[in-house]
Image (spheres, helix red, strand yellow):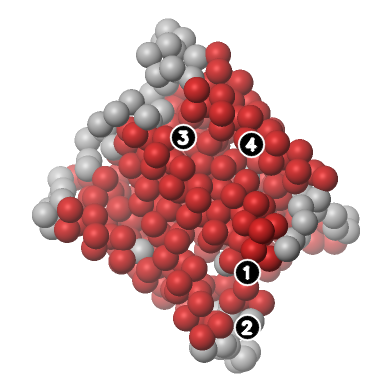
Amino acid sequence: MGKKTWLIYALVTTVTWGFWGALSSIPMGNGFPSTLVYCVWALTMIVPGVVVLRIHHWKVQTDRKSVIYGSLIGFLGAGGQLLLFQALKVGPAYLIFPIISISPVVTIALSYLLLKERTGALGVIGIVLALIALPMFEVSKGADAGGFGVLWFVLALLVLAAWGIQAYFMKLANKTTDGGSIFFYMTVTALMLIPVALVMTDFSADINWGMDGMLATAGIQVLNSIGALCLVFAYRYGKAIVVSPLANAGAPLMTAVISLLLLGVMPTTTKIIGISLAVIAALFIALQPEDEVAPSS
């Protein structure tokens, strides 16, 4: 594989997640609840899962470490998604998403301390700019959150920790487990949590099972699943301290651009600043020579 293979996978993730982010709210606005969106997403994980398993000749690593790491990655990702749904029920989205968006800080800290990952000056600058840009994509005006209590804050922190730790283990697992097996366990665990999402669903409300509801959700969530698969391989070939901030800043960047081009949604000044920082961050990270890194401690 080439030195920049990780970058190709990371860019595919940012593009697919960008379209997913721009379009995912449309079915929910048409009456398809977020908890059922989770169920559809879990089912769409099967599509890229089958493709990658076929490439790997239907072989799945079943040793103890692969099962534990793969299941942990899956439960952290899918469980974090369910916690997010609950947080959005009891708290303000305009505060929850900025908190969650800094989950790469957890990944970077764990990768730096435990995996001894390092990068050069351009990479460091890119990481810092990406971390600064991330909350800017989610900041929006809203009322004071004082009337919402503290549960939303605790849940948001749990999601932040879950997704930050998930990315760390995604990199760690790739040292001993092939990407197809990791994604297989991610798919299985996502499917296992479907009953939880169904329990959280209010079936007394009107649900749009039609073309612009459930079926549109399926088409959009496939993009999410493809992005998740590519992210696994981005971590396989790249450093977590670089992949995490790039993917997490690049995806909302693409969402903002796509929303502007396809939906005519003009980003706020704050988001424009975030877009600018994300573009610069991506360039610095991409231009960082992979053989010029700071020495490990």
- Mark 1 neighbour density, 10 Å: few (under 14) some (14–19) many (20 or more): some
- Label 2: state its secondary structure: loop
In this rendering, which labeled residue sits more in front, label 4 or label 2?
4
Residue beneath disc 4: 278
Q: Residue at x 66, y 77 (%)?
A: 29
Q: CA distance from mark 3 to mark 4?
A: 13 Å
Sequence-first tag of 2 and 3: 2
Residue beneath disc 1: 25
Q: Amino acid at mark 3?
A: Val
Q: Amino acid at mark 2?
A: Gly
Q: Amino acid at mark 1?
A: Ser
Q: Position of residue 131 (x, y in %)?
A: 64, 33
Sequence-first tag of 1 and 3: 1
Q: Position of residue 272 (x, y in %)?
A: 76, 43
Q: Residue at x 43, y 47 (%)?
A: 12
Q: CA distance from mark 2 to mark 3?
A: 35 Å
Q: Amino acid at mark 4?
A: Ala
- Label 3: state its secondary structure: helix
Vertical position of residue 163 compared to residue 28: above or below? above
Sequence-first tag of 1 and 4: 1
Report the disc number at residue 243.
Answer: 3
